[in-house]
Amino acid sequence: MITENGIVTQTNRSTAWIKTIRSGACEGCSSRESCGTSHSGKEMIVTVKNTLDVEKGDQVVIGLETKPMMFLTFLLYVFPILLLIGGAIIGDSLAPLLEMNRSLGAMVLGFGFFGAAFLVIRKKHATLTQKDEFKPFLVRKKRLPDSGSCQVS
């Protein structure tokens, strides 16, 4: 699980807005601009379900499961390349039947399948953003140091 520390900036019964600092994991992610977070510089606001009844000012840990992230990585990076290669192989095989240059057939069908992959990804995006497993969630409240533990006599 990927976790990040944050501070609750605003809440209501069902939703909490968490201010967090963008970590190195975010900097390396190609989806950092479209993951549903709003940000200015290194700070960003993440919207999560308020499952722990947090209040404004609480320090929390938010998380994101690794398995859905691996699926998204496959969908964004591997799936288009597989379709590109598959389309090129099919285009190379079909070109002689269509009496065209094999390289041209491979290129046309390869790029066609590559483009189709992004249409599939765009269509899948709408359904995936509605699923809770692809959204960040509250892991726990962080305990603040007890200010009453140091007593002066």
Image (tube, rainbow, N blue to C red):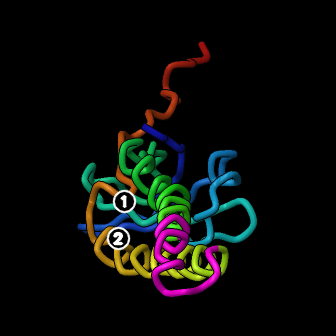
Identify which amino acid the numbered label 1 is placed on. Lys
Q: Is residue 64 left or right of residue 128?
A: right
Please name the residue that numbered disc 1 is placed on.
Answer: 135
The crowd level at tag 2 (other Cα within 10 Å; few <14, some 14-19, many 20+) is few
Q: Is residue 106 left or right of residue 49?
A: right
Q: Give whichever of 43, 78 is nearer the camera.
A: 78
Asked whether the beta carbons under mark 2 and mark 1 sit within 8 Å of each other, the answer is yes
- Magenta highlight range: 88-102
- Rendered view: 3 above or below 12: above
Please name the residue that numbered disc 2 is placed on.
Answer: 129
Query: Can you give x and y, in whole percent of width and height, for residue 145 in the image?
Result: 52, 28
Q: Is residue 136 left or right of residue 96?
A: left
- Rendered view: 150 above or below 24: above
Q: Is residue 35 visible?
A: no
Query: Can you give x and y, in whole percent of width and height, for residue 82 in the image?
Result: 49, 59
Asked whether residue 95 is drawn in magenta, I would say: yes
Identify which amino acid the numbered label 2 is placed on. Thr
